[in-house]
Image (cartoon, coloured by chain):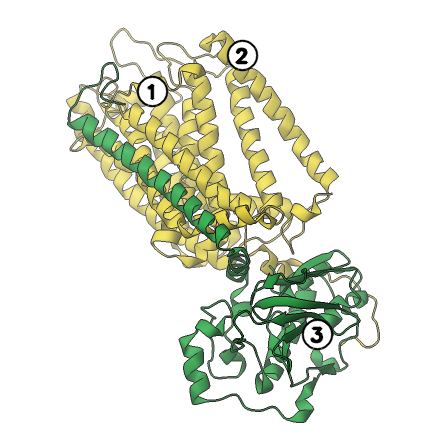
Amino acid sequence: MDREFITRGVRRCSTPRFLLWLSPWVAMLLFGAYCAGLCLVKGLNQTNMDNRYAFGLWIFIDLTIIALGAGAFFTGFLLYIMKFKELKAVINSAVVIGLVCYSGAMAALMVDVGQPLRAWFTFWYPNVHSMLTEVTFCISCYLAVLFIEYLPIVLKNRKLRDIPSFLVFEFELHKLIYVLAGVGTFLSFFHQGSLGGLYGVLRGRPFAFREGFFVWPSTFFLFIISAAAVGPSFLILTTWLVEKITGKRLAKDRVFLLLARISGILLSVYVLAKTVDTLIWINRTSPGLGFTASQYYDWKPFGTWILFAEIVLCGLLPALILLTPRLRAQRAWLIPAAALACCGVALNRYVQTVQTLALPTLSFDKFLSYTPSWQETGTFLGVLAYGVLVYSFSFRYFQIFPEERELKIQVRPQQEEEPVLAGRF
Amino acid sequence: MFPWNYGFHFGPASVIFLGAFYTVLVVVATTILNALWRSHGDLSKGRVENIRWHSDFHDLSAADRTCRHVLTGEFQSRECPNAFDCRECGTHAKLIALHPPLAAAEDEAEIFGMSFPLDRMYHRGHTWARPEADGTVTVGLDDLGSRLLGAPDAVDLPGIGSRVQANGTAFRIRKREADVRVLSPVDGEVVETGGVDRGFFLRVKPLDGLMDMRHLLRDAEVKPWLMRELERLQLALTMEGASVPSLADGGVPVADIAAAYPKTDWDAVCGEMFLEP
């Protein structure tokens, strides 16, 4: 039915089967929209957040998916600025993932902030001294850049490029894509940093507060490095996942290996920086604010295991695997390592968001616990469903993996029997 | 946001922050406007077909973009930097000056049972161009192209008086699920249209009296190119799930290859062979 919209030479499932795949995600999206609607109409009393616990599931998820979506800017930077040509095989996927992550994060933020009709206030009356303002500006601009980067992928659709103006615009826009890649890198670099800086400047929260360089706390740099490190790992993970779901090979091994090597190098730099930062925090910053580090880890379930899991289990271990050529060449090692790296960054964002707010800082404070309400969870599930739907549509109708057709020959398990006709060559 | 907004204060922070923000906005907007402006220029100058070909060429696999001088053994490997338009290629001009193309022997007009007459020149998209005595050029599908499409279901030819350009769309052919555009080997104005039965598809008059055909394959270049094309066809058929006999099995391509592979995605095979990825 939709065959003429599908890229030439690639195989996609039948339309009914595709609709069947979409149906649970559409149901989840509708449920998410209902939950978000409740929060927007009735207010944040629908959530389990309060004045003390102002950041919850949504902010944790936002920070995580923005870090994971960093593959978009970092892959664009490596391909268009550093000229790693092999990454052409995954750049479209990286852009779609980036778009999904950033637009999903913006949607969740919009529900969290509330009052969407006044969203423009943040742009019109910006507090230029607030890192949150920088985050808002950078993410909005970068989302716009991602939309523009996504446009050539859409316009390259087989049917759409029959329209001359679309074909020509796609061609001309693609020629200038390196400008957008440069702008995207600049914006991502700063907003990842600002998101980290947001916690590092919380002098009233000694668990999060960090010293740094000039106006930037160390978390500013740690967020940038960690996002750049896990972006390629998340790209490995999603490509592998799509390969498993569709039963197709989508990118050559050398692309996986290159992404793994880049991720491994950056992850090891991050682990080193994080270790130094943690030691400085334990021995100087925190005692200077009147707290010994052990006090933070007395509150269960946030024991020291969380620090070990973040730095060693989900940092050092995957970094070593990704840096070892023999191990990263095997999917059985590569995929768990990439997954661990992604879990590591999620854990870091969880610690920064949830643990920071849970710990008491004043003598009359209590240890707080928080469980998201079903409306919060539903909104998050809606964002997840939205991401799967956008990616599914993109994968079906656009050329997300240019090497797919070339690789088709290598995965065919059994050649179909053709009638043998006399005279064929 | 702006100096006239309530609560706005001029200070280093405002200047740095808003300066960076506006710079980003200006760069993004300029990029979009630039792309739109260039697109407008392309559309008004009629560069659509040129762009379509460059876009298609960019999407071809590296092996399919091989320079013609690799086929003749002058280079070990080289990708064509000019989208198969050797008229713009300095390297091609130098090589032709050093080693003029060898004339092919008469028996080379038949290659693997297919007819490739030496009185015409061949485009890598499986069309040929034959200069006529009246100064026009006849354009047709080469024998391999004809066998790939067999008896077409439909042929969409340009109108008389319309213009075609080298590497632009000459005409469209539909065969089973395949709908392919066939590339024009030459620039010119269509003065006559033919069809499958007439042995040619177009007769084209040069626009400025001269037809530059340096980009087309001729004489001794044809055989090595065709051998490579047969390899490409085998690969394309294999990719689309057909069990393909090797050349060592002998035999010649049948008149209607599509009919021999009824279950194969013929659109993909034709896209590969007619350079439309």
Q: Could you tell me residue A198's position as x and y percent?
A: 28, 25
Cβ atoms under marks 2 and 3 closer than 8 Å: no
Mark 2 residue crowding within 10 angstroms, few (<14) / some (14–19) / many (20+): some
SS for tag 2?
helix
Is residue B78 at least partly visible in the picture?
A: no
Residue at 37% x, 57% y is A83
Q: Is B191 above or below relative to B99?
A: above
Residue position for label 1? A122
Which chain is home to disc 2? A
Chain letter of mark 3 equals: B
Is B83 above or below relative to A396? below
Q: Which residue is mark 2?
A: A38
Question: Hue of chain A?
Answer: yellow
State the residue position of label 3. B144
Using a 10 Å C-alpha cutoff, classify the residue at mark 1 as few (fewer than 14 neighbours), some (14 to 19) or many (20 or more).
some
Give the x, y percent position of residue A61: 44, 27
Q: Secondary structure at mark 1?
A: helix
